[in-house]
Amino acid sequence: MEDPTDKLSEKENKDLNIKEWYDFIAIIADLAPGIHVGDKEATRRLIEMLDIHPGDHVLDVGSGPGITAALIVEKTGARVTGIDLSSQMVSKARRRAEKLGLSDRAVFQEGDVLALEFPDHTFDVVLFESLLTILPGDPGKALEEMVRVLKPGGRLGGNEATMDPGTLPDLDALLAKHPAIQRCFTAESLRKQFADAGLEITHMDEVQASQAPALDMKSALSEIGCGGLVTFFLVSYPKLVWKLISDSRFREAQRIDEQVTSLSKEYMGYALIACQKT
C-alpha cells in the first residue's frame, strides 16, 4: 500500500528554489543555527550511533553553517569534509571553523549530493540531517551517490523528519507550498529507502513529535555572545529586512514556514538511522 506521506511535494511548483531558500536562511544561521529537527541533541545521538573514530574521514552532506562538522571534530577528533548547495552556508561554515580553530580538520565546499565530486570509496562515514525531505531530486539517487563514495564497511547515517500519516489537511497543504519540503517520510518508509539502497541498518531511533526537543535559543544566544549579537543586528538583520521588503516570495515563504512550525509540533517527529555498507 502506498504511503501517503511519501509524496507531498512535486504536486505544485515552488515559488522559491531550495538554493534561494537556504541562502536566505543563512542570513539568520548565526542567531538560530538549529535548522534541523532534534537540534544538537539529535546530532550528538547520530554521532554516537555512527561510532566515529579519530582516524575517520567524514562527509557531512548538507553541512549548513558547520555546526555538525564542528561537533564531530570536537567530540571525536575525526576529519570532516562538508558540502552544501548554498554558497552562503559554505561561507558561514568556513568562518565558524576558523573561529573555533578547526580549519585544519573541517573543510567546506559547494556540492550537489546527486553528483558528488569525490572518487569511489573516499570516506569512512557519511552523514546528513534533514536532507532527503528537502532534496529537489530522487532521494534514491542521493543515497546511491553517498554509498558510492563510502568505503566498504563504512557507516552511513541520517536524521530525517517523520510525519504522522494522520496529519491535518491544512498542514499537508502548507507543506506542499513550503520551499524546503519536497516530500515526507514515515519511519517505515525511511527504513525502506535505506534498505533499497543496499545498506544494512544497524540502529534506528524514532522520536515522536511530543518527545522532540525544542530549539535551545538560550544556548544559541550564549554561543554567539554579545559581539555576535551586535554583528547580527548591524550586518545580517538589515539584509533580512531588505530581502523580505524587496521580494514578496520570501515574505510568503516565511509566513508558510511559521505556520508549518506551529502546526507540525503535534505531528512531526524525526528518525535517526545508522547503516553499514556491506
Image (cartoon, rainbow, N blue to C red):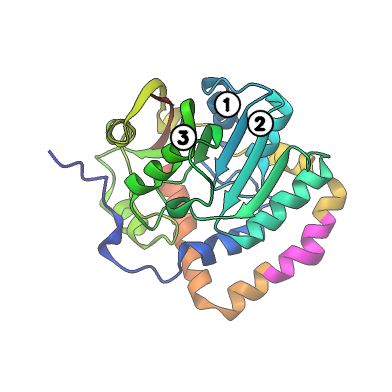
Q: Given the image, on which type of amino acid does mark 2 rest?
A: Ile
**Residue 256 image position (x, y, % from top left):** 44, 61
* Residue highlighted by disc 3: 158
**Residue 65 image position (x, y, % from top left):** 66, 49
* Residue highlighted by disc 2: 72
Q: Is residue 237 magenta?
A: yes
Q: Which mark is residue 47?
A: 1
| Labels 2 and 1 touching (C-beta < 8 A) | yes
Q: Which secondary structure, mark 3?
A: strand
Q: Residue at x 28, y 47 (%)?
A: 168
Q: Which mark is residue 150?
A: none
Q: Given the image, on which type of amino acid does mark 1 rest?
A: Ile
Q: Is residue 118 magenta?
A: no
Q: Residue at x 35, y 58 (%)?
A: 174
Q: Which secondary structure, mark 1?
A: helix
Q: Residues within 10 Å of mark 2 (few under 14, many from 20)?
A: many
